[in-house]
Each structure stands twice: as C-alpha cells, then as structure tokens.
Image (spheres, rainbow, N blue to C red):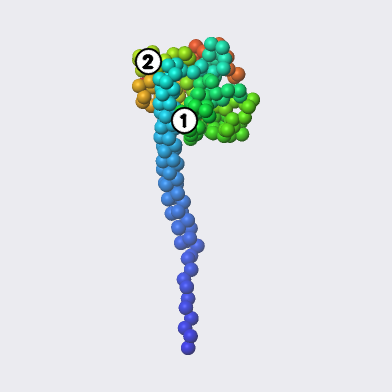
Amino acid sequence: MKHLRYTRAFTLIELLVVISIIGLLMAIVLPALSSAVKSAKSTVCMSNLRSVFQASVAYATDQDTFPPLNNDVNEGSWQYNYLLYDGTDYDSTWGPLVKPSSGLLADTQVFYCPLQTNDFHLYNSGTNPWPVVPGNDTRAGYGRRYGLSGESFDEEVKTIAFAADVFHFADVVRESHGDGVNAAYTDGHVTYVKERILLFNGLSKPFSPIDNPTVKDIWKRMDKVQ
C-alpha cells in the first residue's frame, strides 16, 4: 500500500516574514557595499594621480623642463590644464607623457579617476576619444598647476600642489568626489582636499583668462591643506 507524502508549504505570513528579513539585510549590506566600492575607487584615483606626478617628474628631470600647460599663448586660461592631445599634437600638459614615440606611461587609463562621471574626462568616451582622433581634443581626468611651463623640477624648492582632479567647473567636482578633489604635491604625497571654493567659484564657461586669479586662489588654498 502506497503512503501519500504531504509537503508542508509556507504560509503567507511566513513568506512575508522572510521577505522582510531579506529586505532588512539588503538595507544594511548595500550601503556598506556601496561605500566600500567608492573607497576602493578613491584609492585607485589617488594611486593614478601619484603615477602621473611621478611620470611628470621623470620627464622634467630628463628634459630639464615641464611642457607647456596648454596650446594657448602664455598659458592662456589656467582652467585649460588637462590636455593629452589637442587635435594636432601631444606637446601640451600631459601629452609628452603618452606620446606614442616617447611616452613614459604606456597605460593611458592612469590619467583618469574611476569616480569621474563627466563624459569629457572619461577614458575613451564618446566625446573623449582614445586612440586620438585628429581634430578632436583628448582630455585627462587630472589637471596640472599653472606657472610651471618651461621650469625644471629642481626650481620647485617648496612643497606645493602640482596636479589634481579636474576642477575647472564646479559641477565636474560634484559629479566625481562630491565635495573635493585629490591633489598631488611636489614632495610626492597625495591627499584629499575639501575647499568651498571648489564648489562655489563662478568660473566661466567657456574658459577665460579673466578667471586666472580665481584658479590661482584655488591652487593656493590647496597648498595650505597639504
């Protein structure tokens, strides 16, 4: 004689309890996971910026000078400080570090912060091509300080901010780290800088040399944070 086996099913209340527990666990775990991911990306961002600084020092030591800040006469607008390629050549800002024939950094992605979301400063995005396209700018995710064009590294006798996440517009800062930028200093260390002026400064769109005093003030404030 066959015996029928009965499988007990979950009641509706039991299912609701299980779903509630799963929802509670997700509410606890997901923010922690998101925070961990952001922390890891921030660490990579700082490491990349340090690598860019070290390559810049190597270049300046070998060439006895830093390359021009941009392709504008006398550095033009200091907001324009992040070029890898200006549509014609690799002669400005970071370009010599990635120039195919003599570049010091084979991995171009080191010029980008993983927390950046602005399409103009992402690696190989629709508006920021890599490999380069003649006639189009290719921009890095980090910007260099003004006033270094033509100088050698030995001339920088005091510790100052040398490079940082791009901050030429406040919304670019908000879209990446939110309330500040990573900055690399001439003694080799990298730190996170929170300054109100990064978020509230009125820098012009499009760029203009008339805003150079504001850009200068931002760099000077980063000098003090170190």
Residue 14, visible in the rendered structure: yes
Residue lying farthest to the bottom in this orientation: 1
At 43% from the left edge and 54% from the top edge, which residue is drawn?
21
> Residue 87 placed where, x, y %?
61, 24
Q: Quadrant of residue 207?
A: top right
At 42% from the left edge and 29% from the top edge, which residue is drawn?
51
> Residue 217 placed where, x, y %?
45, 14
In this orientation, which residue lies closer to the viewer: 154 or 7? 154
* Vertical placement of residue 170 versus 8, above or below: above
User: Residue 193 got which mark?
Assistant: none
- Identify the secondary structure beneath mark 2: helix
In this orientation, which residue lies closer to the viewer: 49 or 207? 49
Q: Is residue 88 left or right of residue 163?
A: right
Which residue is tagged 1? Answer: 105
At 48% from the left edge and 65% from the top edge, which residue is drawn?
11
Tell me the quadrant of the picture where the C terminus can be found: top left
- Identify the secondary structure beneath mark 1: loop
Query: Badge 2: few (under 14), some or many (20 or more) residues near its Cα, within 10 Å?
Result: few
Residue 173, visible in the rendered structure: no
Residue lying farthest to the front in this orientation: 101
Which label's residue is closer to the chain start, 2 or 1? 1
> Residue 168 placed where, x, y %?
52, 21
* Vertical placement of residue 226 versus 7, above or below: above
At 41% from the left edge and 37% from the top edge, which residue is drawn?
39
Which residue is tagged 2? Answer: 154
Question: What separation in Å lies between label 2 and label 1 (alpha carbons)?
Answer: 22 Å
For the residue marked with disc 2, what is the amino acid?
A: Asp
Q: Are marks 2 and 1 in contact (CB under 8 Å)?
A: no
In this orientation, which residue lies closer to the viewer: 90 or 14? 90
